[in-house]
Image (spheres, helix red, strand yellow):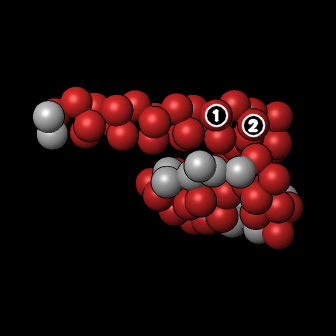
Amino acid sequence: MKSKNVAYILWFVGCFGILGLHRFYLGKVGTGVLWAATVGLFFVGALRDLFTLGKQVDQANMSRNLKTIANAATSK
């Protein structure tokens, strides 16, 4: 399970989101690279993430739970 606290700390430590560390943490490697290469999508994306990061963590956790359930169902 991903933690909202860790995600927000990584957003803060990663120069207010411009390094994309929080995106790497959530498994969004492609956008993490994009954020790092474009200074947080010209800081607009990094600022947007400040307000949507909690929901992104919830979605990452839900996706992980669904994959676990799907794997359990197919292995029976």
Q: Residue at x 45, y 41 (%)?
A: 64
Q: Is residue 73 visible?
A: yes
Structural crowding at the residue carrying mark 1, measured as other residues with C-alpha within 10 Å and reported as few (<14), some (14–19) or many (≥20)? some
Instruction: Name which quarter of the figure residue 14 lies in.
Output: bottom right
Position of residue 53 measured from the top left corner of the image (x, y, whole percent): 73, 40
Q: Which residue is mark 1?
A: 58
Q: Residue at x 26, y 37 (%)?
A: 72
Residue type, numbered disc 2: Gly
Give the left or right position of residue 70, taking residue 10 as reference.
Answer: left
Position of residue 25 measured from the top left corner of the image (x, y, whole percent): 59, 59
**Which corner quadrant holds the C terminus?**
top left
Position of residue 43 measured from the top left corner of the image (x, y, whole percent): 77, 50
Position of residue 28 measured from the top left corner of the image (x, y, whole percent): 50, 51
Q: How many marks?
A: 2
Of residues 50 and 45, which is closer to you in this image?
50
Structural crowding at the residue carrying mark 2, measured as other residues with C-alpha within 10 Å and reported as few (<14), some (14–19) or many (≥20)? some
Is the C-beta separation of discs 2 and 1 under 8 Å?
A: yes
Of residues 46 and 72, which is closer to you in this image?
72
Residue located farthest toward the front when viewing the structure as drawn = 76
- Provide the secondary structure element on which disc 2 rests: helix
Q: CA distance from mark 2 to mark 1?
A: 6 Å
Q: Is residue 42 visible?
A: no
Instruction: Name which quarter of the figure residue 6 lies in.
Output: bottom right
Give the left or right position of residue 40, taking residue 74 as reference.
Answer: right
Q: Residue at x 49, y 54 (%)?
A: 27
Give the left or right position of residue 37, taking residue 70 as reference.
Answer: right
In the rendered image, the vertical position of residue 14 relative to residue 44, given as above or below: below
Q: Which residue is mark 2?
A: 54
In the rendered image, the vertical position of residue 31 relative to residue 58, given as above or below: below
Residue type, numbered disc 1: Asp
Q: Residue at x 69, y 31 (%)?
A: 55
